[in-house]
Amino acid sequence: MQKTTFDKLLQKLSQKLKHQDTNMRQSIPPAERLAVTLRYLATGATFTDLHYTYRIGVKTISCIVREVCQCIWSELCKEYMKMPSKEDWLQMANKFQESSDFPLCLGAVDGKHIRVIKPVDSGSMFLNYKHYFSIVLMAVVDSDYNFIFVDIGAYGKECDSSVFKETAFWKNLTNNTLNLPDEIRLPGTDYKLPFVFVGDEPLLCTITYFVHSEAINLTN
């Protein structure tokens, strides 16, 4: 990360990351809290490794990472993960058609298992079908692999379709509150077709909005 990017992010977060000094010790400044968290996210270093690098206690680092991540999300989500407008959706559909010759596609949906250490007293809640412990990242991306929507934290034992139906995106989709474009006619057709999202078979929740990607055979 460039220093200018770090400074810009710090400016947005510094007020939320400030802690009051006490008679016993000075609080860890916002810049150091952000640096610790970004190092953790970028390298996957353990809290013990970070403890030796920054001379901060392991438990303190654990609290810092959680706090800073929550601040980053709450501060930036409305700017970088905002609800697309109809014009935004149309631009995404145009890019999909340009990149893959697939008309009327607004995004691709899929889930990803993120490996975790089994939480204490969690039983088999986090044990997935691949026989390791995980949480589920469910996402909708555009043709450039940018996140349009993301939901993270479902139990690893849950299947993708079950996780997806519990997301805010699915609820907005079924309630028709996603600002989706109206149906349009494709060149050479006499009837209107809806815009769609593509996903694999477990995510084939409704014919109106989803197309089983494996059943499509596009040619040039």
Image: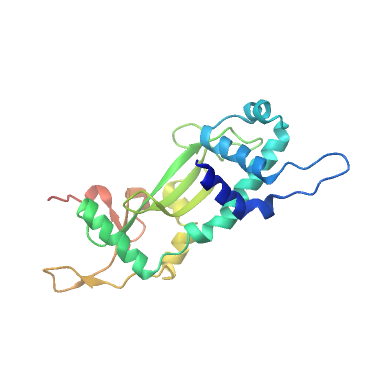
- The total number of labels drawn is 0
Q: Nearer the viewer, residue 113 or 107?
A: 107
Residue 162 lies, with reference to residue 65, above or below; the image says below
Query: Residue at point 50% right, 32% down?
Result: 132
Residue furthest to the right in view is: 23
Query: Residue at point 60% right, 47% down?
Result: 69
Q: Nearer the viewer, residue 106 or 53?
A: 53
Query: Residue at point 85% right, 45% down?
Result: 22
Q: How is the image coloured?
A: rainbow
The image quadrant of residue 63 is top right
- Is 201 displayed left or right of 47 in the figure? left
Residue 178 in sight in this render: yes
Give the image location of residue 190, x and y in percent.
Answer: 14, 74
Give the image location of residue 85, x and y in percent.
Answer: 40, 68
Q: Nearer the viewer, residue 70 or 162?
A: 70
The image quadrant of residue 47 is top right
- Is 118 displayed left or right of 170 in the figure? right
Residue 180 in sight in this render: no
Residue furthest to the front in view is: 4
Give the image location of residue 37, x and y in percent.
Answer: 60, 40
Residue 93 lies, with reference to residue 218, above or below; the image says below
Give the image location of residue 215, x and y in percent.
Answer: 22, 50
Q: Nearer the viewer, residue 1 or 109?
A: 1
Query: Residue at point 45% right, 36% down?
Result: 129
Residue 150 lies, with reference to residue 84, above or below; the image says above
The image quadrant of residue 196 is bottom left
